[in-house]
Amino acid sequence: MQSLYGAIANYKLYYMENKSKGLGDTVAKITKATGIKKVIDTVSKIIKKPCNCGERKNTLNRLFPYNN
């Protein structure tokens, strides 16, 4: 079992490496965490049409950047 301090250190490391650049990154993280991304990918395969998630993410990042 991992100690609380180890868990906090891992969380901080993950957060610092995967810091959102804009709204698109945040939306992508939320959809992945909630399972929506998996559903979208499955539907995209079934209907044989790409979801263009990457393009949408980049557009949102460009339009709504976070000033870090």
Image (tube, rainbow, N blue to C red):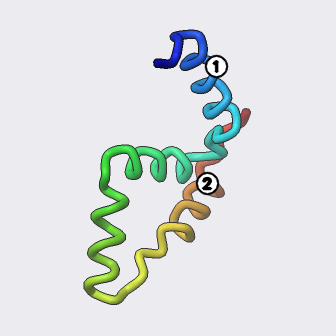
Q: Is residue 62 above or below residue 64?
A: below
Name the residue that disc number 2 marks: 61
Identified by mark 2, the residue type is Asn
Within 10 Å of the Cα at label 2, are there few (<14), some (14-19), or many (20+) other Cα atoms?
some
Q: Residue furthest bottom?
A: 48
Q: Picture coordinates of residue 17 (x, y %)?
A: 70, 38
- How far across and how far down the image is residue 8, in percent? 57, 17
- Disc 1 or disc 2, which is closer to the eye? 1
Rendered image quadrant of residue 20: top right
Left or right? Give the position of 52 relative to 22. Answer: left
Along the line of sight, the residue nearer the viewer: 37 or 68: 37
Taking the spot 56% from the left edge, 70% from the top edge, the residue there is: 55
Secondary element type, mark 1? helix
Tell me where residue 68 appears, x and y as whole percent.
73, 33
Is 61 or 30 nearer to us in this picture?
30
Question: Circle 1 is placed at which residue position?
Answer: 9
Q: Seen from this angle, which residue lies furthest right?
A: 68
For image coordinates 66% across by 45% down, the residue present is 21
Give the alpha-carbon distance from disc 1 to disc 2, as whole Å. Answer: 28 Å
Q: Is residue 47 left or right of residue 63?
A: left
Kind of residue at badge 1? Ala
Decide if residue 50 is on the left or right side of residue 24. Answer: left
Rendered residue at 48%/68% (across/down): 53
